[in-house]
Image: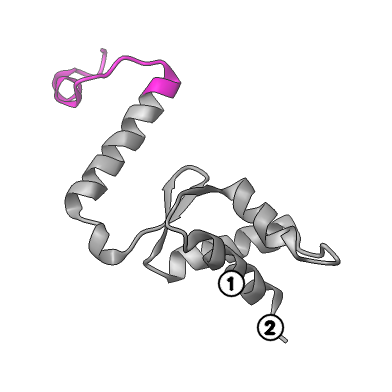
Amino acid sequence: MQSNAKQIKDRFVKLLDDGLSHSRKELFAYAKEDEEENTYTIGMLAGALKTLVDSCNMYHCIERGIYQKIEPSEKTSDDIISGYLSILKKTLEKANRNLVDPFSLLEMDQEE
């Protein structure tokens, strides 16, 4: 018999192997789907997901709470940079702030 963590990770892998992006909520629901006793806790699910992402270079958190399988050859440096820029842009939009030129910040004195 496999440990709960191994069973959960196997379920996550099975869902993520379709190559599509999936939310954390969707992954958790899928892991619990066939479980008869529903004994998986949120902590067990979260820990298994973190371990999967940290220990395998094919499964990634592509944005907050969204996970996807990405083949290593598909991930180029341009993709990484555009991913970071996308995250930064979304963060700024959510914060409702105007884009600030970082170089102008370097020229400001302490009073400003």
For residue 82, above or below residue 60: above
Upstream in the sequence, badge 2 or badge 1?
A: 2
Residue type at numbered disc 2:
Gln
Residue type at numbered disc 1:
Asp
The disc at residue 2 is 2
Q: Which residue is at a point 81% across and 65% down the rendered structure image?
A: 39
Q: Left of 37 or right of it: where is 71? A: left
Q: Quadrant of the N terminus?
A: bottom right
Q: Which residue is at a point 16% across and 25% down the rendered structure image?
A: 106
Q: Left of 60 or right of it: where is 100? A: left
The answer to whether residue 39 is magenta is no
**Which quarter of the picture shows residue 98?**
top left
**Marks 2 and 1: CB-CB under 8 Å?**
yes
Residue 83 % position (x, y): 30, 43
Question: Which range is magenta?
Answer: 93-112
Residue 11 % position (x, y): 61, 67
Between the C-alphas of marks 2 and 1, the distance is 10 Å
Assess disc 1: are there few (<14), some (14-19) or many (≥20) residues with their C-alpha within 10 Å of its C-alpha. Answer: some
Residue closest to the eye, 20 or 68? 20
- Return the residue found at the far bottom: 1
Q: Which residue is at a point 37% across and 24% down the rendered structure image?
A: 92
Q: Which residue was labeled with disc 1? A: 10
